[in-house]
Image (cartoon, helix red, strand yellow):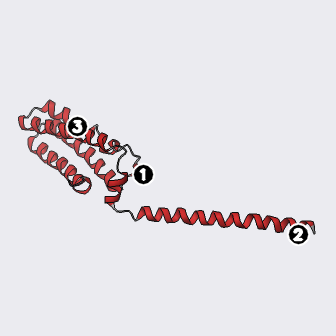
Amino acid sequence: MKGFWIIVVLIMVLVPLFMFSVDKGKKKIEKRDEEARMTVPDIVDNTFYESASKFRMHMKSLDEYDDALAESIESQDWDDICKYAMLLKNTSPLLFTGKKKVELPKDFIMFDTFFHFQSLAVVEAAESREMVSLNIEYEKLQQTCDNCHEKYKKKE
């Protein structure tokens, strides 16, 4: 008879614990589904970067490197072209967010990857000293920036 009451008590304790854990699991799934339904503007506005001022400051430095690169291309200063293209390649909009990759939209990560790849292509074109090739690669680099800005830069 004692064994029967022990089993009854265990059931009375374990069933509510089990029900609580199932409910908690449902809430986690609901939260995950809600996050998946967030639109890109929600992500950009709420969780895109840890510090908006730091992100803008770093993006401004990218803009300055790009301006210097454009001037170098115009004057055909091959050493400066390589220098500024490498500065662009070695910077990362993704890192400027202060977030982990898993916290960012996948297409933003792809834009960042394309940006690095295309910056390197500009370096290679500059090393070959082929102006036509350089202009083509630089235009592609500009397009990577434009594509990302079109999707993620807030319209003010």
The residue shown at (33%, 51%) is 109
The residue shown at (69%, 63%) is 17
Viewer-closest of 95 and 155: 155
Which residue matches tag 2? 4
> With respect to residue 73, does 38 lie above or below?
below
Which residue matches tag 1? 102
Q: For the N terminus, give its image quadrant.
A: bottom right
Q: Which of the labelled discs sits on residue 61, or is there none? A: 3
Side of 46 relative to 129 (left or right): right
Side of 27 relative to 58 (left or right): right
Query: Which secondary structure lies at badge 2?
Result: helix
Side of 149 relative to 46 (left or right): left
Identified by mark 2, the residue type is Phe
Q: Is residue 128 shown to the viewer in this render?
A: no
The residue shown at (54%, 64%) is 27
Query: Which secondary structure lies at badge 3?
Result: helix
> With respect to residue 143, does 16 lie above or below?
below
Viewer-closest of 113 and 155: 155
Q: Say which label, 2 or 3, has the lower sequence index.
A: 2
* Label 1 vs label 2, nearer the camera: 2
Query: Which secondary structure lies at badge 1?
Result: helix
Farthest residue to the top: give it: 79
Category of crowding for the residue at label 3, using alpha-carbon neighbours closer than 10 angstroms: few (below 14), some (14–19), many (at least 20):
some
Identified by mark 3, the residue type is Ser
**Distance CA(mark 1)–CA(mark 2):** 51 Å
Q: Quadrant of residue 105?
A: bottom left
Q: Exactly how many numbered labels are in the figure?
A: 3
Q: Say which label, 1 or 2, has the lower sequence index.
A: 2
